[in-house]
């Protein structure tokens, strides 16, 4: 639903409808949403990100407009609820009126973009005429024990043109909850 509130003014107009362009969750229990302003109607315009979780009536304002740069809102780990869906809108306001973006629904578990794993190594072994690949890695330092990541390994020979994708199976070690390691099934 598009909401436009106007005041009578002959030369100026309410701001155009802003557009939410992305919300990125990096797997560290915090996320950032960015928007594109539209026309300012010839007047100074303020932008306010408003959100609530689905099923909640209370509307909240962005907790941090500074950490992620201009035209963005940063939600830190104290505010982020991993298993909730957020309803996010941006309101543009100037002296001639206001305009609200289309709602943007964010489900964190469906939008995770984790940092790549670290310390990746690949070893090829021949056992009884069968080639096996043993892969080891450590999760990104931003991934904690409450997040389970599934990994894929893309392989291509030096002469090849197509990438082969292999699913990696993760498992956690049980000694003091050390970093997760992985193995590639043949």
Image (cartoon, rainbow, N blue to C red):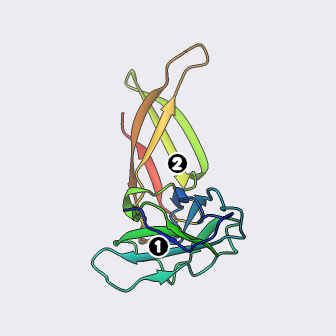
Question: Of residues 55 and 90, which is closer to you in this image?
Answer: 90
- Which quadrant of the figure contains the N terminus? bottom left
How many residues crowd mark 2 within 10 Å: few (<14), some (14–19), many (20+)? Answer: some
- Residue 12 rendering spot, x and y as whole percentages: 67, 64
- Which quadrant of the figure contains the C terminus? top left
SS at mark 2?
strand
Q: Is residue 78 left or right of residue 52?
A: right
Count of residue discs: 2
The answer to whether residue 36 of the structure is visible from this angle is yes
Q: In which quarter of the image is residue 140?
A: bottom right
Question: Of residues 124 and 45, which is closer to you in this image?
Answer: 45
Disc number for residue 136: 2
- Residue 37 rendering spot, x and y as whole percentages: 62, 59
Q: Residue at x 51, y 29 (%)?
A: 155
Q: Which residue is drawn at 61% across and 56% down?
A: 38
Q: Residue at x 71, y 68 (%)?
A: 43
Tag 1 residue:
177
- Residue 171 rendering spot, x and y as whole percentages: 39, 58
Of callouts 1 and 2, which one flags the residue occurring earlier in the amino acid sequence?
A: 2
Q: Which residue is drawn at 55% across and 59% down?
A: 18
The answer to whether residue 139 of the structure is visible from this angle is no
Question: Of residues 83 and 47, which is closer to you in this image?
Answer: 47
Q: Is residue 105 left or right of residue 133?
A: left
Disc number for residue 149: none
């Amino acid at each position: 639903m598009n909401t436009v509130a106007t005041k009578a003014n002959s030369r100026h107009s309410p701001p155009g409808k802003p557009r939410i362009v992305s919300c990125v969750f990096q797997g560290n229990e915090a996320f950032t949403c960015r928007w594109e302003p539209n026309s300012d109607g010839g007047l100074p315009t303020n932008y306010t990100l408003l959100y609530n979780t689905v099923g909640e009536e209370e509307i909240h304002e962005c907790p941090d407009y500074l950490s992620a740069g201009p035209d963005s809102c940063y939600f830190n780990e104290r505010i982020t609820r991993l298993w909730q869906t957020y309803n996010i809108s941006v309101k543009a306001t100037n002296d001639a009126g206001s305009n609200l973006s289309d709602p943007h629904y964010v489900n964190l578990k469906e939008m995770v973009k984790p940092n790549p794993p670290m310390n990746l190594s690949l070893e090829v072994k021949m056992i009884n005429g069968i080639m096996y690949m043993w892969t080891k890695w450590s999760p990104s330092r931003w991934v904690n024990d409450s997040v389970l990541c599934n990994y894929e390994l893309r392989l291509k020979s030096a002469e090849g043109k197509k990438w082969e994708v292999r699913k990696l199976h993760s498992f956690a070690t049980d000694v003091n909850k050390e970093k997760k390691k992985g193995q590639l099934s043949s």
